[in-house]
Image (cartoon, rainbow, N blue to C red):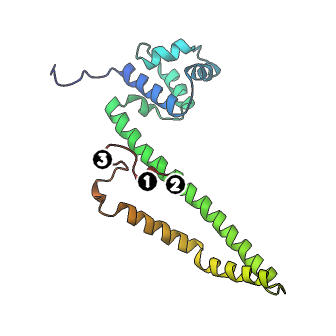
Amino acid sequence: MDADRPPRETANEKLGVAVRTLREEKGISQVELARLMTERGWPWHQSTVYRVESGKQTVGFSEALDLAGVLRTSLDRFTWGSAEANESDFVYAARARLVRQYEVVAEAVCRMLAEEKIAGRTIERHKDSEWKRVQAALDDLIATAEEYHVDAAIEEGARRYEERTEGEDSDDDDGQDEEGQPGIVDQQ
């Protein structure tokens, strides 16, 4: 065996790393995983989870099927080596961040459109007010509504992004800065 290469992982070790990684990603304790497996007919205890995760206990095919169901993954995921799993997790994390930010933006657009509608109704309701201060406030609201709308917010967000990322090499952007810290894409 080449001294520079790490030893190959056994199937049990690959399974163990995958189970621990998936369990932790989903925020499930070892005790909870044991309970969920017991509910599926496997007499698991916290110590069983520990032995599986450390690669010391073999898991049969039917048991692995139920384990995959509990962890909401495929059987294939249990066969990945540590390096492949780490890289795949990195890619899936990028996907999760993208989806999370999509949801943040979609919710913000929904709220912005609702506020635009409220502003329009407010303008309509008070356009004939006899009070000068109400008319002054109304003029201010109309000017603000013309400047602050969904399309302008999207343009402003794009402008800020361009300003913050100006001069960065976009071909090698993995969402992290030079020190490996989350870059602008992770900031909220």
Where residue 157 sits: x, y (%)? Answer: 48, 66
Residue on which the image places disc 3 = 178
* Extreme-right residue of the structure: 130
* Residue 81 visible to the viewer: no
Residue on which the image places disc 2 = 101
Where residue 76 sits: x, y (%)? Answer: 42, 33
Counting other residues with Cα less than 10 Å from the Cα at mark 3, is it few (<14), some (14-19), or many (20 or more)? few
Q: Secondary structure at mark 3?
A: loop
In the image shown, does 136 or 148 lie closer to the viewer? 136
Q: Quadrant of the N terminus?
A: top left
Q: In which quadrant of the rendered view does residue 38 lie?
A: top right
Type of amino acid at the residue the image marks with label 3: Glu
In the image shown, does 160 or 1 lie closer to the viewer? 160
Where residue 45 sits: x, y (%)? Answer: 57, 13
Type of amino acid at the residue the image marks with label 1: Val
First-in-chain label (1 vs 3): 3
Residue on which the image places disc 1 = 185
Give the CA separation, mark 1 to mark 3.
14 Å
Q: Is residue 34 above or below residue 150?
A: above
Looking at the image, do the residues carrying marks 2 and 1 touch, with CB atoms under 8 Å apart?
A: yes
What residue do we see at 36% from left, 61% from top?
Answer: 165
Give the CA separation, mark 2 to mark 1.
9 Å
Q: In which quadrant of the rendered view does residue 112 lie?
A: bottom right
